[in-house]
Amino acid sequence: MIKQTIGIVSTLAMGLLWASGCSPVRVKPEQTQSSPVFKKLVTTTHSWDGQVLPTYPNGQPEISILRIIIPAGARLKTHLHPVINAGVLLRGQLTVVSEDGKTLHLRAGDPIVELVQTLHYGVNQGGSPAEIIVFYAGVTGSPITLVEP
């Protein structure tokens, strides 16, 4: 009797679902991108303050890539780069200030073509760490950053 009742209830429930247009929910698999996406972030011959980039130095080229994490509220020491460098802020926010007071405000995803041979510093005025990847185009045996004494 119980088996017969369960069978009848199940059949009625399925019939009601079918009659009302309800159907089981099918989760669609995540749509995958069929092709790579390329997005040019920047192409320039100038640093962010408008100065023309210098020629590359002579010597054996050496590429350096740094991941820099700046804690919330931290200020980097005043410094300069003797070589061309560029980066992308991955997360957080960062303000870069040049020796003549020009400022650049970066948010996650923003690119930067850094100042060359110009004193500047960065400060994270946000509430979370800022993380930036910077690529330096130098030569073997030469520094990529000089900190102001």
Image (cartoon, helix red, strand yellow):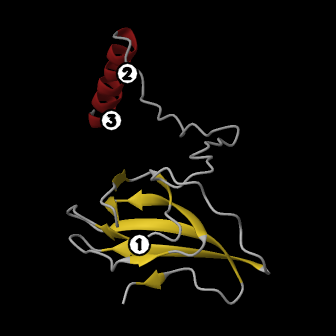
Q: Position of residue 50 (x, y in %)?
A: 49, 50
Whole-percent x, y for residue 100 in the image: 33, 62
Residue 14 circle label: 2
Q: Secondary structure at mark 2?
A: helix
Q: Residue at x 42, y 22 (%)?
A: 23
Q: Mark 1 or mark 2, which is nearer the start of the sequence?
A: 2
**How many residues crowd mark 3 within 10 Å: few (<14), some (14–19), many (20+)?**
few
Question: Residues under labels 2 and 1: Cα distance?
Answer: 74 Å
Instruction: Look at label 1 and name its amino acid.
Output: Leu
The x, y position of residue 46, in whole percent, is 57, 52
Residue sitting nearer the eye, 114 or 87:
114
* Nearest to the observer: residue 103 or residue 40: 103
* Horizontal side of residue 140 vs 70, given as left or right: right
Residue ranking furthest to the front: 100
Asked if marks 1 and 3 touch (Cβ < 8 Å), the reply is no
Q: Amino acid at mark 2?
A: Met
Residue depth check, mark 2 versus mark 1: number of the one nearer the observer: 1
Q: Earlier in the sequence, mark 1 or mark 3?
A: 3
Residue displayed at 28% across by 28% down: 5
Q: Nearer the viewer, mark 1 or mark 3?
A: 1
Q: Which residue is mark 1?
A: 119
Residue 136's place in the image compared with 12, above or below, is below
Would you place residue 61 above or below residue 87 in this image? below
Could you say whether the residue bearing mark 1 is in a helix, strand or loop? loop
For badge 3, the amino acid type reads Lys
Label 3 vs label 2, nearer the camera: 2
Query: What element does badge 3 sit on?
Result: helix
